[in-house]
Image (cartoon, rainbow, N blue to C red):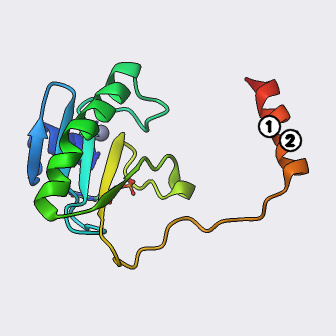
Amino acid sequence: MEDCIFCKIVSGEMPCHKLYEDHRVIALLDIFPTTKGHTLLVQKEHEQDVLHSSEENAQALLTTARSLAPTIMKTVHATDINVIFNVGANAGQTIFHTHMHIIPRYAGDGLETWPQGETDHEAFKKLAEEIKGNV
Ligand code: 5GP
Ligand code: ZN
């Protein structure tokens, strides 16, 4: 798609530090890494986010993550990883072409995880019913 950075990377119009490629996915280093080894798995087809991706493309991202992540971790000596999809601008998505983040984590890396809220079983019960009612 015109003006899409990831389409330009997929087509070769823009350079990247590529780690892996197959017919559905390319893996490349994030240009502004959160931690050393921060990798993006970008699907080749332009779809706006993982909820709009075909089942096959979404599966291919997960399959690639599962095979490539251990190699990344071994290479950068990371103990753990976060695997993240941002979906929508309020969730931090800035490039609207489906991609998965693999973010290596290290002991004492100082990154915060999600803040935790209050437990409210009454509210959870109502909410769970509401969501199930909408399935
Ligand atoms: P999002 O915020 O949409 O989930 O993630 C987009 C990611 O793409 C960001 O982590 C950002 O650092 C990365 N990024 C933005 N522009 C480029 C680029 O030109 N090349 C590469 N390799 N990564 C990019
Ligand atoms: Zn695109």
To which quarter of the image does residue 96 belong? top left
Image position, residue 108 (x, y; %): 35, 78
Question: Quadrant where the N terminus lies?
Answer: top left
Residue in the image at 45% along x and 53% along y: 93
**Residue marked by disc 1:** 128
Q: Nearer the viewer, residue 7 or 68?
A: 68
Give the structural element (helix, strand or loop) at label 1: helix
Residue in the image at 32% along x and 59% along y: 80
Residue in the image at 33% along x and 51% along y: 101
Question: Quadrant where the C terminus lies?
Answer: top right
**Residue marked by disc 2:** 125
Ligand 2: quadrant of the figure: top left
Mark 2 vs 1: CB contact within 8 A = yes
- Work out whether residue 86 can be spotted: yes
Residue in the image at 31% along x and 68% along y: 34
User: Would you say 131 lies left or right of 75 here?
Assistant: right
Give the structural element (helix, strand or loop) at label 2: helix
Dot 2 crowding, Cα within 10 Å, few <14, some 14–19, many 20+: few
To which quarter of the image does residue 41 belong? top left
Image position, residue 111 (x, y; %): 41, 74
Up-down relation of residue 117 to residue 124 (above or below): below
Up-down relation of residue 75 to residue 45 (above or below): below
Image position, residue 122 (x, y; %): 91, 49
